[in-house]
Image: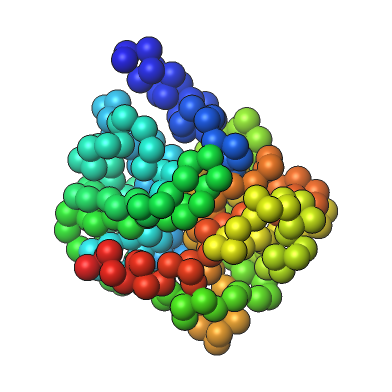
Amino acid sequence: MRLVAFCLLLAAVQGLPRFKPRYRHRHVGVIGGDEASAGEFPYTLSLQDTAFGFRFHFCGASIYDENWGISAAQCFQGEDVLDPSNLLVVAGELKRNVTEGHEQSIQLSQFIQHEDFNGFTMSNDIAVFRVTKPFVFNEYVQPIDLPPETHTATGDCVVSGWGTTEEGGVASQFLLKATLPILTDKQCRVTYGDALEESMICAGVPDGGKGPCTADMGSPLVCSDTGGSYLAGIVSWSHGCAHANTPGVYCEVSYYTDWIKSHAV
């Protein structure tokens, strides 16, 4: 048990994938991203583990309402996260190793993985979690809207997170952002074939060099083709990080709008 804990700790410190790589595909900040400004992404959360006596970022998340957040189901795998008291989220975060006065660090009280989550196919890679006290909304901390049920996102969207900036690298200290175009399912299946399910969506640039990587799992992909910004995707998996002709795959939130509303209550 101590050896397992040590391995998890070492992986986190080095910025490697947080859990044993038993899944078929994993994202290993945002590669090619630009630094965000304070309050630019008030819905983006840093999900952090405190089980080893200090805090480290391992996944991203989004604010749903005052009491609930949304992330990837894969972020709640592993012995040390079975107890939500080991976990907290930080809202209003920009640079992780600097206290800027906008941060709200709140412990989790509960998390709910999708009941049909599959860690091998990454099907239904979505979870909601409750915090022990409400988020206080201001210009640095705000919720993000959900898409209409079954809506298909189009156009350019923005992913934000603190993941690694290169494969095998360390997690970014700065919140990074990247603008990525949505691909059609037909375009995405050129790379992933039947591994791409109807409840998944792809985004990426053909030349690569820009997209999510390790510790970005659970981070938000936000689109605005409806006229307002909404949570279109949750960083889930890919073949490597930001490779050419290898888009990132996201849990498509519009397939789960009703699920979120029925569980985050």
Left or right: residue 29 versus residue 195 is left
Q: Which quadrant is the N terminus positioned in?
A: top left
Question: Left of 197 or right of it: where is 71?
Answer: left
Residue drawn at (57%, 73%) of the image: 223
**Residue 103 seen in the current view:** no
Q: Position of residue 209 (x, y in %)?
A: 75, 49
Looking at the image, the residue that sits furthest to the bottom is: 227
Corner quadrant of residue 213 = top right
Rendered view: 245 above or below 228: above
Question: For this rendering, which residue is in front, 133 or 94?
Answer: 133
Q: Residue at x 52, y 30 (%)?
A: 22
Residue placed at 36% from the left, 42% from the top?
A: 76
Residue at screen point 29% across, 52% down: 112
Quadrant of the drawing holding the C terminus: bottom left
Left or right: residue 17 compared with residue 243? left
Q: Name the one closer to the observer, 88 or 218.
A: 218
